[in-house]
Image (cartoon, grey):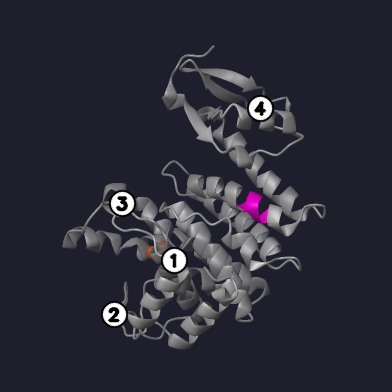
Amino acid sequence: MLNDNKENFLLIDLGTLLNEKLLGFNLYILHDNNFVLYRGAEVNFTEKHRQNIIAKKLNLYIEKKEKEKYIGYLKQNLKNIVDDKNINNKEKSKYYYQASRTVLAQLFSESEEVSNTKASAEILSDTAITILTASDFEMKNILENLQFEYTTFTHSLNVALIATIFAQSLGMKNEKLQSITTGALLHDIGKKEIDPKILFKPGKLEPEEWELVKTHPVIGYNIVKTFNYDDKTIYNIVLYHHEKINGKGYPEGIKDIPIEAQVAALCDIFDALTSQRCYKNALGSFPAFKIMFNEMGDALNRDLLAEFIKLFKDYGN
Ligand SMILES: [Fe+2]
Ligand SMILES: [Fe+2]
C-alpha cells in the first residue's frame, strides 16, 4: 500500500499497453483512494489483464518517476508494431495514434529537454510514414482514430497525419515527405513557451495576449534551428504556417509562401475548425471546408484547397 499522493502518479491509457510484453515499469490502480501495485515491472502484460481492467473499469497509473521508462516503452513498441507484418494497417494506425499522443504530450511538456525532442519527433515521423505509405493503408484507418479535443499535442499529431497524407497525394515522397511529417509534428512547438492561461483562455484575447500568441512561430523556429536539420522544409513549416497568400498572415506577412508551409497551414486550419476548443464547438469536415473556401478565399491558395478537399471526398462525414 502506498501513500495516497496523486502528485507522484500519472494516469495512462490502456490502449498504449501491448499484450505479452514486459512492462518495464510498475502499473498501479486506485483502490480505496490508495495507489496499489497492479502489475510489477518484470511481469508480462496479458490479454487477461486487459479484460480484467476493462471489466472492472479500472484506471491505470504509473509512478511519475518511471515516466521516462514508459515513454521509452512506447517508442520501442511503435517501432515493433509498424514493422510487424502480422498486424494490419488498421490496428497499427490505432496503436500509433494512442502511443504517439502520449509521446507528444511529453514532447510538449515544460519538463522535456529540447535535446530529446528531435529524437522523439524522428521516431514519430518514421513510424507515421511507414503506416501511411503502406500498401494496405486506407484513409479511414487514420480518420477513425482522430480525436478532436484541443490540446497542442493532439492537434499537432492530427496536423502531422493529415499533412502527410495530403503531401503524399500531391506527389511528395522520401525525404520531402519525412520533413513535412516532422515539420507538422513540430509546427506549434513554440507554444510550449506561451502561458497556457492565454492559449486556452475561453473568450476573446486582449490585443497584447494575441500579440504573445503570434510569437509562437518564431519561438518554434528558434527551437528547431538548434536541431540542425539539412532540409529547409521543417523550418519553413514551423516559421510560416500562419502566413497567408494575401500577405495578412504572421510573423512576416510574406505572400510567396513555401508549398510545405501552405500544406501544413491548410491541415492546421482544418484541424482547428473541426476541434472542440474552449471558445467554440467543433465543426464537421464539410462545414469546415465551406468556411475555408468561402470566408478565407483570398488568404488561401484555392487550387491547393481544392486538392485538399478532394482527399476527403470519398470518406464523407
Ligand atoms: Fe500555429
Ligand atoms: Fe497549429
Residue 54 is marked as none
Cα–Cα gap, marks 1 and 3 = 21 Å
What's the residue at 65%, 72% (across, down)?
Answer: 175
The kind of residue tagged 4 is Asn
Asked whether residue 279 is in view, the answer is yes
Give the Cα distance between marks 3 and 4: 37 Å
Is ligand 1 less than 8 Å from the beta carbon at label 2?
A: no
| Cα distance between the residues tagged 1 and 2 | 26 Å
Q: N-terminal of the two: label 1 or label 2?
A: 2
Residue at disc 2, secondary structure: loop
What amino acid type is highlighted by mark number 3? Phe
Quick check: is 162 in the magenta stretch? Answer: no
Crowd rating for badge 3 (residues with CA inside 10 Å; few <14, some 14–19, many 20+): some
Tell me residue 301's x, y (percent). Answer: 43, 85
Identify the magenta region.
Answer: 92-96
- Left or right, 95 with respect to 115, comes to right
Query: Which residue type carries mark 1?
Result: Gly
Q: Give the mark toward the camera: 2 or 3.
A: 3
Secondary structure beneath label 3? loop
Q: Is residue 95 magenta?
A: yes
* Tag 1 and tag 4, C-beta contact below 8 Å: no
**CA distance for labels 1 and 4:** 36 Å
Which is more foreground, mark 1 or mark 2? 1
Which residue is tagged 4?
Answer: 52
N-terminal label among 1 and 4: 4
Closer to the camera in the image, 57 or 112? 57
Name the residue at the right extreme: 86
Foreground: disc 3 or disc 4 = 4
Decide: few, some or many residues near mark 2? Use Cα within 10 Å; few <14, some 14-19, many ≥20. some
